[in-house]
Amino acid sequence: MILLSLVSFIVATLAAGLIVRWCKDHATSYGYAMPQRFHHGHVPRVGGAALVAGMVVSWGLGVAQSSLWGDPASLRLDAWVVSWLVVLLPAVLGGVAEDLTQRLSVRYRLTLTGASGALSVWLLGLNLPRMGWPWLDTLLLIAPWLGIAIVVLAVAGLPHAFNIIDGYNGLAGMVALIVCLALAHVALQVGDRALAALLVSTAAATGGFLVWNYPRGMLFAGDGGAYVWGVVIAMASISLVQRNADVSPWFPMLLLIYPVWETIFSIYRKAVRGVSPGVADALHFHQLIYRRIVRGVFHDDESRRVLMRNNRTSPYLWGFTLLTVVPAVLFWNNTPLLMAFCGLFVVSYVMAYLAIVRFKVPNWLRH
């Protein structure tokens, strides 16, 4: 597992460096008029390609190690890993196509991530066997297609949730890294070493990307990177619950409550204003923190000011994420407590959002 992670990190770091070196000219296609843009200069947005490179090489090495040279670590990485890569393919193609052309509509990208969801059911046999409530579990037993529908929705929707929070240097990447490691920790607790190996390798590839993404923002993940994180984490979450009865289905829900609720809340506030959910805006939680909390400036140059404020935004959200990750890891098999923490997060998020909108932020948060 350590070898696979090291290979994943090195390959992703080198691939990201090559992208930074050779793709600067293409970065000019991402114009300053984009409402979600908060940086100066032209930065490549195809960091997802570096993630995929690190993951493909490390996962392929794991399969080769198991099939050709024996598997002393008992990771049991074999042909099913190839199926994971096939499931990733439609979503990654859609994300990278959008990063390269800026012309692929939300409808087409959602269709492609939905195709990944359908493939996860067909090739991997993913299903949600329980929800932690007796009456819901009975319903899933009577109508198993409901579990399949939830799987497709999760695999199709989570990539877009990560895309929504991907706005500042190190934000989505660090959230993905933390979530992958948390899932890997619980996978090891229940003896699922194969799943843990894939997750740790994904976290390592993310670390290689972050070398170039934080703090200087020389490379962005783009839609392709967000879709890689979303699909892999969604599949891993469902697999962990499906394969291990001790793991509460609310464990991954609490882990991912920040990007999931950010997406749901964004759809709600846009619907209230009569705006399509697919229209980008600058009113997400992380964008409000950038504008109304992160105000410290130490340089006169405009590009340096934007970079400083960009870098200082992400740690606020890292702390926000850890408030859900820590209890999720501590109580991964306690469904009532995990549900309570999910509810607490939703209430806290709404209260914090309203406080920022109404300029009622405590002074200590500004320093």
Image (cartoon, rainbow, N blue to C red):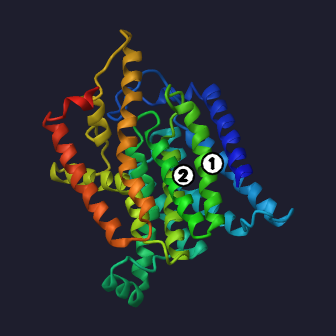
State which quadrant residue 339 falls in: bottom left
Q: Pointer 1: what residue?
A: 52
Q: Is residue 255 above or below residue 37?
A: below
Q: Is residue 50 visible?
A: yes
- Residue drawn 58% across the image and 38% down it: 209
Question: Looking at the figure, which quarter contains the C terminus?
Answer: top left
Q: Secondary structure at mark 2?
A: helix
- Residue drawn 81% across the image and 60% down it: 65
Q: Nearer the viewer, residue 76 or 100?
A: 76
Q: How many marks?
A: 2
Q: Amino acid at mark 1?
A: Val
Q: Is residue 270 visible?
A: no
Report x, y in % for residue 121: 53, 73
- Dots 2 and 1: beta carbons under 8 Å? yes
Report x, y in % for residue 205: 62, 45
Q: Nearer the viewer, residue 90 or 349?
A: 349
* Residue at the right extreme of this rendering: 69
Report x, y in % for residue 16: 63, 35
Q: Pointer 2: what residue?
A: 228
Q: Is residue 330 above or below residue 277?
A: below
Which numbered disc, 2 or 1, marks the residue that appears first in the sequence?
Answer: 1
Q: Which mark is residue 294?
A: none
- Residue drawn 20% across the image and 29% down it: 363
Q: Secondary structure at mark 1?
A: helix
Q: Nearer the viewer, residue 43 or 194?
A: 194
